[in-house]
Every structure is written in C-alpha cells, then in structure tokens.
Image (cartoon, helix red, strand yellow):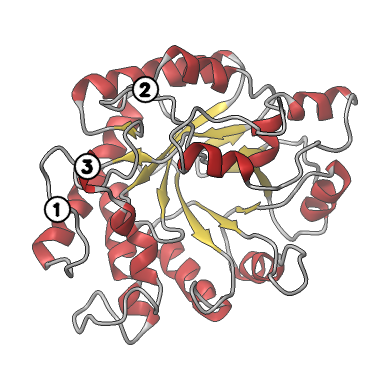
Amino acid sequence: MSLFSNIKINNLVVPNRFFRSATYEALATRNGSATDDLINLYRSYKKVGLIMSSCTLVDPRGRHHPTMLSLVDSDACKSFSRLSDAVHDEGSAFGVQLAHSGMFSKIQYLNGHQPETPKNMTKNDIERVIHNFGQAARAARDSGADCVQLHCAGPFLLGSFLSHVSNDCRNDEFGSDTVEKRSEFMRQAICEVRKNLPMNFPVLIKLNGCSQPSFINHEDILKICQIAENAGANAIEIAVDRDPKTKLPDYSVVSRVKTNAKVPIISTGCYTVLKEMEEAVKSGRCDMIGLSRPLIRQPGIVGMFYSGKAEKATCKNCNGCLAYTSGQENPLKCILDK
C-alpha cells in the first residue's frame, strides 16, 4: 500500500492518499460565496487526492467568522459548483466540510439570530440543526461535491457535545453521563445527512484525537468512531497535535481506531516528512495522510513529492498562519513568507 496508490471511500475512488484537511482561509464573501482567490487557492493544491473545503456554514446561528463558506444562502450555494469544477479540473476529488460553530459563534456575525450558547440547546434547537445538516449535505452534492464531512472536532457544536467537559449539565438523551448520550447529536446528524444522500455518496467525520482533560479521552474516541461508523460514516479523520509533555505528535489513538474500524482512517497533524507519511500508511496506522499547515506554506508540496523535487515540507508547524487568519481575519498565508 503506497501513498501514491488510489483508495476507495464508499463509491468514490480517490487518486492517492493525500488529503487536504479543512482549514479556514478567510477568502469567502460575506454571504459565504467562494471568491476567485479561494478557487485559485484550491487549484494550487496540485496532486492532492481529496481536497476538503474549509468549515461551511449549515445554520445561520452557527457563524464564527464573517467570511465562512456557507450553504445557507442560495447564491452562495451556486458558487460551490465553481469550486468543485476547479478541483476536478486539476484531477482531485472535492469534499465539503459541514459545520456549526456552536460556542465559537460570534453574535456580531449572526445577522440578528441569537447564538446557541451560553444556554442549553432545546430539543427543538437540536432538531433544527440536524435538519440543516441534512439540507446542506444535499446542497453540497447538488453543487458537484464528491463527499461531505461533518465537523465533530474541538469546540464546534457537534464536538462540544462529545466532550464530557463542555457537555456536563444535560440530563436528556444528548448528554452527559455516557459517551453514547454525548454522541447522540452526532449520530442523528450523520443519519440525517445519510438520509439526504444516495447510499453510495461518501460521508466523512472529523474528530480531535488529543487525549487531554479538556478534550475527549482515547477510550471515548474509540466508542465514538464505532457509533459514527454504525450511523453511516464512510471514513474518519483523526486530528492530533503535539503532546504538551513530549512535544511530539501522539498518533497512538489513530492506530487504535484503525485496528477497530472497517472504514478508511485519515491521520492529520504534524506530518512534514514524506518518508514518515509513507511509513504511516505502509505500517497500517492509517489509510490517508491529512495535511493543513504544510499546504499553507507550500500549496504545491504534494506535486513536489510526486516529481521527486522534495522529500520534506518546509512548514515549521508553528501555528502562526492559523493565528494570523482566524485571530485577525486575514487571508490565509504562512507568516514566515515575508
């Protein structure tokens, strides 16, 4: 099994095992439409097998940035056809990450809607968001996307329900005393998305793999992955970062998930060396390698791997790019490029 070999996710054949992990670019319009700059950026990801869009709004109450992509506005939906066409023209597959920002939502960007926090969501609130995930998934497919991904990582809405830290005061079927209850929102969202799509259309999820008190422990992650797979998820992305003690990335949970899963597993976080990526796939730790920060500094790095012009990305994993973009609403760039 090689990084450069194709892989099948449900009925989608991806030309290789490089995956562009969803990353906020601050390059959409105020209504969530793709701009020419965003389309050109996606075109520049030469040879990446599957390009996932940045987090895309499914509900008007879930916006955390003014220039998020959106599948809420009908005009914005039309722009996704241009995105998917551009990616397909370069030979890559295209996916749309569906997201609700939850506690990240900022009231100044909600156009008069009240954010979901700090109050507990009612059952009607949850049902509305679940419905909107399904509608957004259908819109993504209609625009030419090859797959969708539900953002279930970190403090975004679905991810915050999964955590015993943020979901610690509910006493209904959506939390908080068991991982099964904390996963119910995610499970129903996957089922709703699945209901709005053909059975052969791929549905992915993204989870955070950091085993820290403020996130989700590894045992819970294993259970969550099984719940997601049973609900209809066709691939699972696990994102990790450096362990605060060792300063090294901890991929142990990725290996454990892979051992138990029947669907492809995508490992994202801290990969820069081609040889290490190849070993991760060949050893069976994962099926695909997710890249974010290396593609910010070198959008064409995967093409350079193909041609033999590079064996390592020059990204330092410093996170300056993400702070520059998410913190200050600047278009995505590597801050080391002066």
Residue 60, position as x, y percentages in the image: 19, 41
Cα distance between the residues tagged 3 and 1: 22 Å
Query: What crowding class fits label 1: few (fewer than 14 Cα within 10 Å), some (14-19), or many (20 or more)?
Result: few
Image quadrant where residue 328 sits: top left
Task: Please report contact status of discs 1 and 2: CB closer than 8 Å, yes or no.
Answer: no
Residue 237, position as x, y percentages in the image: 56, 53
Query: What crowding class fits label 2: few (fewer than 14 Cα within 10 Å), some (14-19), or many (20 or more)?
Result: many
Q: Earlier in the sequence, mark 1 or mark 2?
A: 2
- Report whether 317 appears left or right of 262: right
- Residue under label 2, please give it: 80
Query: What's the amino acid at mark 2?
Result: Phe
Q: Indicate which label's residue lies in the foreground, 2 or 3.
A: 3
Task: Please report contact status of discs 3 and 1: CB closer than 8 Å, yes or no.
Answer: no
Does residue 305 appear in the picture of this structure? yes
> Which mark is on residue 13?
none
> Which mark is on residue 108?
3
Query: Looking at the picture, does residue 209 appear above or below residue 181?
Result: above
> Which mark is on residue 128?
1
175, 23: nearer the viewer: 23
Report helix, strand or loop for mark 2: helix
Cα distance between the residues tagged 1 and 2: 23 Å
Image quadrant where residue 35 sits: top left
Image quadrant where residue 36 sits: top left
168, 6: nearer the viewer: 168
